[in-house]
């Protein structure tokens, strides 16, 4: 529902005041709410405070947990070297004072959100019942001390959705850790999928323009399908020539003809890097009888090997700050989809 900007302004001031143990801290400078797309931006008077607030991911607002992320155009490397023009608090001072447990957020000393950048690692095929402590132990046994661990979990059940992200404190160990963790057996025939979440310019191109600030969104309001609902366990996912890409775009983004054509062009170009694309479908609301197909990408490759190569390179990557889900579709299912006249 509609969230008044004044209420969100007051909420975040109160939260930061509690975490800092200072009733007069009042760190919020401005709030922008986009009610149509269910997100907001909160601007703080200190880059350090904004960074600390990333650890409050999942905090309850009006009875609902909210997702906290950086804005799409946030540049972590640039932020580290920019001066802080408003508040001169040192990083160590803020980190020492800031206590997420004051507002009911349990902390293990690790950051719970990974900044975008070359050292953000995607970890896929995690067993759903594996607790964060065990995941941390597993990763640190190979790559050394973690700086951040972000395991994506179902809000209602608390179970892992099968994937997450991490960042090691020693960035020089990132590449070797990826190699050593990739294919690691984590039980029941599951092998870890580990790769860089974002590698330089290899991320897909499309990124909507948005204001800068800390992005705060309702965890159950965004009109996109959860990745976990779309990614099949690899042990049961038989490779075919057809790939289904999910969690890339929303129906709302597809309603704008200009945006739709731009998105379609970017995705088609990326998919063609891995093989010959025979057909490509990105259905909108008025193009399919099956609403479950809306805003999903269906790619038909010439060979199974090309589809496997594409999945290996695309799954877990970032597109408009969303983590891409990827699965195979049977030839039979695809023929049914084709019969529904989804051609653009």
Image (cartoon, rainbow, N blue to C red):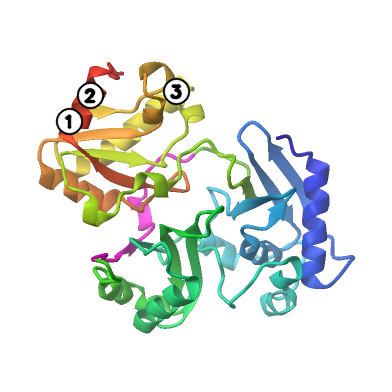
Q: Is residue 151 above or below residue 245?
A: below
SS label for mark 3: helix
Residue contact at pointers 2 and 1, CB within 8 angstroms? yes
Residue nearer the viewer, 257 or 152: 152
Residue 46, x across and y down, in percent: 72, 63
Tell me the residue that label 2 is attached to.
Answer: 336
The residue shown at (23%, 66%) is: 189
Q: Residue 135's image quarter?
A: bottom left
Q: Which mark is residue 332?
A: 1
Quadrant holding the C terminus: top left
Q: Earlier in the sequence, mark 3 or mark 2?
A: 3
Q: Is residue 52 left or right of residue 231?
A: right
Residue 107 x, y percent position in the rendering: 62, 73
Highlighted magenta segment, given as a residue range: 189-207
Q: Please name the residue that numbered disc 3 is placed on.
A: 258
Where 266 sits versus 254, above or below?
A: below
């Amino acid at each position: 529902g509609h969230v008044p900007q004044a209420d969100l302004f007051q909420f975040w001031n109160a939260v930061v005041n509690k975490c800092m143990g200072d009733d007069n801290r009042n760190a919020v400078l401005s709030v922008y709410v986009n009610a149509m797309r269910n997100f907001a931006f909160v601007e703080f008077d200190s880059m350090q405070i904004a960074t600390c607030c990333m650890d409050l991911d999942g905090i309850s607002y009006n009875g609902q947990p909210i997702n906290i992320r950086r804005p799409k155009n946030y540049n972590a490397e640039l932020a580290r070297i920019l001066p802080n023009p408003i508040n001169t608090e040192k990083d160590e001072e803020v980190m020492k004072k800031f206590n997420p447990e004051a507002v009911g957020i349990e902390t293990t000393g690790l950051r719970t959100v990974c900044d975008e950048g070359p050292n953000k690692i995607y970890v896929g095929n995690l067993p759903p019942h594996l607790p964060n402590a065990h995941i941390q132990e597993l990763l640190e046994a190979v790559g050394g001390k973690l700086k951040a661990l972000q395991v994506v979990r179902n809000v209602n059940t608390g179970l892992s959705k099968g994937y997450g992200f991490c960042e090691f404190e020693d960035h020089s160990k990132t590449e070797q850790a990826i190699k050593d963790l990739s294919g690691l057996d984590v039980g029941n025939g599951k092998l870890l999928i580990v790769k860089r979440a974002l590698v330089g310019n290899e991320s897909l191109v499309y990124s909507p323009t948005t204001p800068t600030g800390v992005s705060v969104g309702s965890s159950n309001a965004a009109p996109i399908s959860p990745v976990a609902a779309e990614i099949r366990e690899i042990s049961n996912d038989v490779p075919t020539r057809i790939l289904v890409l999910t969690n890339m775009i929303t129906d709302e983004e597809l309603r704008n003809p200009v945006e739709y054509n731009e998105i379609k062009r970017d995705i088609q170009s990326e998919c063609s890097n891995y093989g010959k694309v025979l057909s490509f479908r990105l259905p909108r609301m008025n193009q399919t009888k099956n609403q479950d197909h809306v805003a999903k990408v269906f790619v038909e490759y010439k060979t199974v090997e090309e589809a496997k190569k594409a999945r290996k390179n695309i799954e877990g990557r970032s597109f408009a700050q969303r983590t891409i889900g990827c699965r195979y579709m049977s030839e039979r299912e695809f023929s049914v989809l084709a019969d529904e006249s989804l051609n653009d």
